[in-house]
Amino acid sequence: MTGACGPKPIPKAAPFFDLRCPWRLLVNGPSEAPEQTIYIVDDDEALRDSLVWLLESNRYRVAQFPSAEAFLEAYHADMAGCLVLDVRMPGMSGLELYECLRDRHATLPVVFITGHGDVPMAVSVLKKGAVDFIEKPFSDRDMLKLIEQCLATERESRTRLRQDAVVARRLDQLTQREMEVLELIIAGRLNKQIADDLGISIKTVEVHRARVMEKMEANSLAELVQSVMTCEAARGRFIA
C-alpha cells in the first residue's frame, strides 16, 4: 500500500498549523476556484465510455482513467469535482486508491461503483468518508443524482476551506506572544487572568489583544472566537 502511493514528503510543521491541511493548499494557490471535473476510474472501457457519454451529454466536464495507477499519476491537490471509482480493478483496487488519497489529504468526494458482492465492502468505506456507492447495473438518473450531490458537497467544502485559509493566513501574522494571548482569550480567560498567566501587565495584555483583533480583522470578540474555532475545529487545537 505504501509503496503504491509512493513517498510523500511531509513539510516541516508551522508552530500552530499542519502544512498538509487542505486549506494550506489554498492559501498561496490560485485565487479562482478550478473548474469541477468528474474523474472516472474504471478498467472497463465500455463502462467508461458509457459514463463519459452520459455526463458530457449533461454538460459535465469529464476525465477518464483505465486504472487507479493512472489516476494517481495524474492526481494533484487542487483537483476539483468528484471521483467515480470502481471498487475492483486489476493492480491497485479502488479501495486502495481511496486509502492512498486519504493519506494525501485529498478532498475529492468519491462515489464507488460496486457489484452485488461488494456492497458490504462499499458500506465500510462510507464510514471513512466516501459520499456514496452505486450498484451495477445502475440507472442514468441515479448516477446523475449522485454526481450532483458530490459536486455540491465539493463546492461547499472548497468554500469552507477557502474561508479557513483566510483565517489561517491572518493567524500566521500574529507574533508568538499575540498567539499566546489569543489562546487564552479562546479559553475564556479575562485580561487580569491572562496577565497573571503570562506574567505581564494588564495594559500589555490590552495592547496585544487590540493587535490580535486588528490583525484578525475581527469586529467583535464573538467574531474573533467564531472564526478561529471554525478554522481550527478540524484539528481540535482550541477544543478541550
Image (cartoon, grey):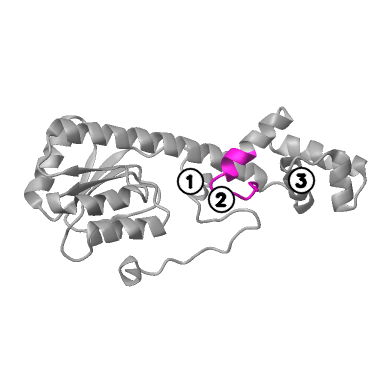
Q: Secondary structure at mark 1?
A: loop
Q: Measured from the top left, where is residue 210 in percent x and y?
A: 80, 36
Q: Which residues are magenta?
A: 228-240
Q: Which residue is mark 1?
A: 29
Q: Residue at x 63, y 40 (%)?
A: 228
**Disc 2 element:** loop
Q: Which is the main secondary structure of the residues drawn in magenta?
A: loop
Residue 169 location (% of width, % of height): 61, 44
The question of residue 41 being in magenta is answered with no
Q: Could you tell me the amino acid type at mark 2?
A: Arg
Q: Is residue 117 visible?
A: yes
Q: Nearer the viewer, residue 189 or 105?
A: 189
Q: Are marks 1 and 2 in contact (CB under 8 Å)?
A: no
- How many numbered marks have been drawn onto this rendered protein structure? 3
Tell me the amino acid under the disc marked 3: Leu
Marks 3 and 1, how far apart in space? 31 Å
Real-space CA distance between mark 1 and mark 2, rounded to the nearest whole angstrom: 22 Å
Three-letter code for the amino acid on which mark 1 is drawn: Gly
Which residue is the site of mark 3? Answer: 184
Q: Which mark is residue 235?
A: 2
Q: Would you say the residues marked 3 and 1 are in contact, meaning their CB atoms lie under 8 Å apart?
A: no
